[in-house]
Amino acid sequence: MIKQMTQINAAALILFATLLLFSSVVSAHGKVSLEDDSCVRGVEGSMVHLSAYQPQFDPEAEYCTEIPNEGKTFWVIDLIDQALRDMPIAVKIVKGSGEKLSETVANLHSTYHPEGVIKGESNLDGGQYTVFVTGEGIPPIQYEYPLRVHMINYVDALRAAILPAIVLLLLGLIANKYLKSRRVQQL
């Protein structure tokens, strides 16, 4: 009986570890309303939207601040409001975040974007980056996007693991009750 319980628990632990290891902790942000979209930044009534793509890994996935892999990353900034399309906009991607900013990875000098779309590509290594979108109006408007490239987000990993852990615990409990009832029946 103890041997069977040990085997069941070991199998459950292996299954749980496999689910945790292969669960996707980076996900595309999908199609949501602008108010609920984590990729939209708003300052003084104006909004911008950032999308990032890595078609060499997943041609259909769209990312925002969590980029799953290192390498060539295409990015698109949508100027949602007309006021932003009527002023010069600059884009800069810098390695690091907060007080620890270092090298500039991409720098698009200030220019007008009447179509409302700014496109670019950058080769991103693993780590943290900051995207600065600056509207050179009066007063200037600056949007910031923190990027995490090829980094595990442990909060998302924990959230992804909770449901499988509950299911495994329930299966273990059911298996334990079943084995106890079979043992009682055999006596």
Image: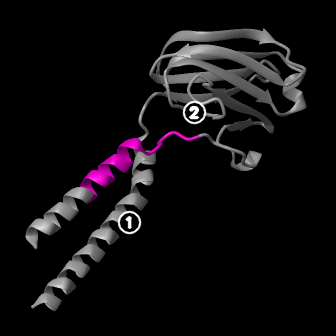
Residue at 63% across, 28% down: 144
Instruction: Give the camera-side residue of 111 and 33.
Output: 33
Q: Quadrant of residue 42?
A: top right
Does the magenta portion include 19? yes
Q: Main secondary structure of the magenta part?
A: helix
Describe the element under mark 1 as helix, strand or loop. helix
Where is residue 48 drawn, in percent x and y? Answer: 75, 32
> In the image, residue 124 lies at what x, y percent?
52, 17
**Farthest residue, direction front:** 186
> As drawn, is 58 to the left or to the right of 46?
left
* Residue in front for this viewpoint, 34 or 29: 29
Mark 2, secondary structure of its residue: loop
Q: Which mark is residue 167?
A: 1
Q: Amino acid at mark 1?
A: Val
At 68% from the left edge and 30% from the top edge, which residue is drawn?
Answer: 51
Image coords of residue 82 (percent x, y): 90, 30
- Residue underneath mark 2: 65
Question: For the residue marked with disc 2, what is the amino acid?
Answer: Thr
Front residue of 93/45: it is 93
